[in-house]
Amino acid sequence: MAKNPSLAIGLDLGRNAVKSVVLQRRGSNRFAVTGFATKKTDERSLLPENVGSIIKAVLEKMGGSAKACCLAVSSADSILRIIRQPETPPELLRTGLRLNGPALLNQDVKDYVLDCASIDPAGALGEDRMRPYLVGGLPRNRVEDLHATMDSIKRPLTRLQLAAVSSYNAFEFAQPDIFRNEPFILVDMGHEDSTVTVGVKGQLVLVRSIEYGGRALRETLASLAPEGGDIYEELEQGEETMVETARMSLAALTREVSSSIGFFEGRREETISQIFVSGGLARSQTLLNLMSEELRMPCEAWHAFERCDIALPEDRKAEFAREAVNLSVACGAAVELLGYKS
Amino acid sequence: MALHLNLLHEIESARRARQRDPLKLGLYALGFVVLCFLGYYALRLSTTNGVVRKKNTLEQEWNNLNPQQTAAIARAEELRAQIALSANAVKFIESRFYWAPLLERLGHLVPPAVQISRIAGDISGRDSCTLSLEGLAAGREPRTVAESLRTTLANDLLGGEGSVDSTFVSLEDGSSQAVVRGVALPTAVFTIRLVVTLPDPQTEITAP
């Protein structure tokens, strides 16, 4: 088995920004952030021919000499499902899923690259002798494009991951006690959509994507903000009209989050007491308060670096503190390469 | 528990398959063998070139030396002929019969009452010869004088070494008289044949 690197780059290829972090292992269970960078993107820059230059610019801005690189991708055409199957080796299950996509995943996945992992390999099998598996996939041409792109900028990929899985892994890295002992719900609010992940005692129970993100909120609030003003600043100032409009806009998200919590609590005799929010919108305390009010439970922004040393220059620490909630996916990608075990 | 998905697994499998492709590995092996052959060929070529260079050098040297060799052979033949000639001359000289000591000794042995009128010699080898002496012996008993001469020659010609065979071919009374110290004495005509064998080719006959 290959030795885990001591230095790894985590890249989050989002639809609004590319984010990256460099994590360094400084002991058996000690890690440090030695670099980070973010760069806003638009639809044009996410075209296959432009992605390379964006990622290259981010990596150059971040610096560092790490070779291992994991890319986490957010994509509307990605697949992320939990299925129940008899215990099967992953290689066989991949083939089975590709050939029987319509039956197992309710869609044809012959043009997808799929991978699967057992969610609870050590757990006892149920009465139906089935085991839950997480299945993730991306269109094959997208995988090949990304691989070729990273090769072309001399940063060959070590791993390609889905953003939702990286976020889940980052939470385990940052909050191991809650991850192992309590039910939890993660809401990663992205630009185009948000991902809701529900887990309990180290086991993934539900993962779903909701078509609501920062873009929808911004479009809703844009007409209310004064010309040239910053929407989020206005929101933070507590301007009543904007807050109420934001509440109405967020309802699309909170409703789905609430139904996810209801789904979980309806199936298990456990109660979720807190919502962990990450992503760009989690930087706004007003939005977190609105979500808390709507969902009637505390919504807390979390970031993945709570147990990391911050080995950054002084002038970048303030910027990092602002961006940290938005770097969870990148952190989760890097952690995967460093071989963290909770 | 952390979830580990890797959507690069197909690309990695394809890469591994490419790396382990038997055709590719075979081509690598073939390439290696070809390289070995090329190396061997280069080695042999350099060796051969060295040999050819050496051969050319030797050929050139041969071309330079061949006329000299031909001339030397001719010269050797010439010298061999001269050596053979010289050797023959030396042999001829060294195998000649030395008459002078024999005749000197013969002269000393002939008494005053005997006159040698003719000597004929014949050499039958380096160390032997045949002499024929014709003469006239004078005395009161001329035959005795002739006999005495024959005996003296047989005993003393070589001083006791070698062998001298002395025989009369003819001995007859002479028809004339010879005056010796004012006295007229009868004569005898004789012919003595001497067969002389020298003891050793190195032995020189010295005067008594």
Image (tube, helix red, strand yellow):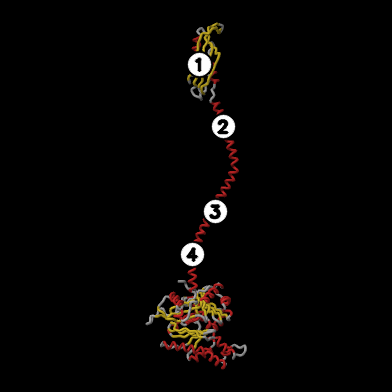
Residue B87 position in % (x across, y down): 55, 30
Question: Which mark is in front, 2 or 3?
Answer: 3
- The amino acid type of the residue labelled 2 equals Ile
Residue behind mark 3: B45
Question: Which mark is in front, 4 or 1?
Answer: 4
Residue A26 appears in the picture as rendered: no
- The amino acid type of the residue labelled 3 equals Leu
Label disc, if present, on residue B25 of the rendered structure: 4
Cβ–Cβ below 8 Å for labels 3 and 4? no
Same-chain check, marks 2 and 1? yes
Residue B84 appears in the picture as rendered: yes
Label disc, if present, on residue B193 of the rendered structure: 1
Q: How crowded is mark 3: few (under 14 residues within 10 Å), some or many (20 or more)?
A: few
Q: What element carries label 1?
A: strand
Tell me how far mark 3 sits from mark 4, CA to CA. Answer: 29 Å
Cβ–Cβ below 8 Å for labels 1 and 3? no
Tell me how far mark 2 sits from mark 4, CA to CA. Answer: 79 Å
Q: Is mark 4 on a helix, strand or loop?
A: helix
Same-chain check, marks 4 and 1? yes
Q: Which chain carries label 2?
A: B
Label disc, if present, on residue B83 of the rendered structure: 2
Sequence-wise, the earlier of marks 2 and 1 is 2
Sequence-wise, the earlier of marks 1 and 3 is 3
- The amino acid type of the residue labelled 1 equals Arg
Question: Which mark is in front, 3 or 4?
Answer: 4
- The amino acid type of the residue labelled 4 equals Leu
Q: Mark 4 lies on which chain?
A: B
* Image vertical order of residue A297 relative to residue B128, above or below: below
Indicate the quadrant where residue A225 lies: bottom right
Tell me how far mark 4 sits from mark 1, CA to CA. Answer: 114 Å
